Image (spheres, rainbow, N blue to C red):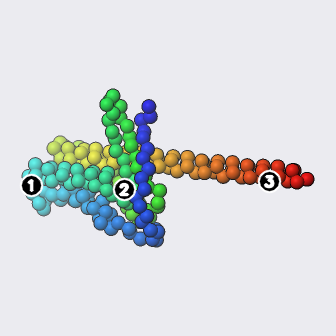
Amino acid sequence: MSNQEEVLLAFGDEGSPSQRAIKHPIALFFHVLFRSLALVLYVFGSYVFSSSFVQLFIAIILLLALDFWVVKNVTGRLLVGLRWWNKVEEDGTSVWQFESKQAPSSNVESVVFWVSLFAFPVLWIVFIFTALLKFAWMWMLIPIVGVALNGANVIGYVKCRKDAGTKIRAMAGQFIGRQLMKQAFSSGSETTSQTMTI
């Protein structure tokens, strides 16, 4: 039994505007909003908002959870045409499932999606080491959660993109194979008809 199951979805005809145009501005806004707010609150929260670690911890974890859900279920599908999830079968095996849209998305949206997907976990890792150097053990918990949630999305989308690329290459290979077979049969039937007329 395969550990991967592929699902191809048709998201409808979204037209073909310029690749530089932003097709989903609201999704793009929320893709960056929750992760940026969590980071800003972590850095400046104790100075500006509250000196209570518990209040900041709860607020930042809620923002990170919102970011995880929005990126995994909404913005990945809209901005880059990918979506992933992991399903546990009855026998306990884990199955990765992927959805991919074949229509190209906006280049701007794609760049913002992938840059922010990789940049924010790196920033959280920097904050882990900063908290470690300051011996701020409690404050180190927040970036660890940030790396875990952002890292899960990174792993999921990297696997999803790899799966989509494999699927596209397989479809292209099948298409080329069919075209070659058609060409071979059509040229073979032409030579047969020519020999019959001679």
Q: Toward which corner of the image does residue 38 lie, by quadrant?
A: bottom left
Residue appearing at x 51%, y 47% in the figure = 167
Q: Is residue 50 left or right of residue 82?
A: left
Q: Amino acid at mark 1?
A: Ser
Instruction: Give the distance between the C-alpha atoms of the residues marked 2 and 1, in whole angstroms.
Output: 38 Å
- Residue on which the image places disc 2: 77
User: Left or right: where does residue 182 sit relative to residue 77?
Assistant: right
Q: Position of residue 57 (x, y in %)?
A: 15, 49
Of the two numbered discs 3 and 1 on the same chain, state the one appearing first in sequence: 1
Is label 2 or label 3 in front? Answer: 3
User: Residue 181: where, in percent of width, then height?
Assistant: 69, 48
Whether the residues at callouts 3 and 1 have beta carbons within 8 Å, the answer is no
How many numbered discs sit on the rendered protein?
A: 3
Q: Nearer the viewer, residue 32 or 177?
A: 177
Residue drawn at x 13%, y 56% is 46
Q: Quadrant of residue 96?
A: top left
Disc 2 on helix, strand or loop?
A: helix
Determine which of the numbered discs, if any, sits on residue 51 in the image: 1
The tag on residue 190 is 3
Q: Residues within 10 Å of mark 1 (few under 14, many from 20)?
A: few
Closer to the eye: label 2 or 1: 2
Callout 3 amino acid: Glu
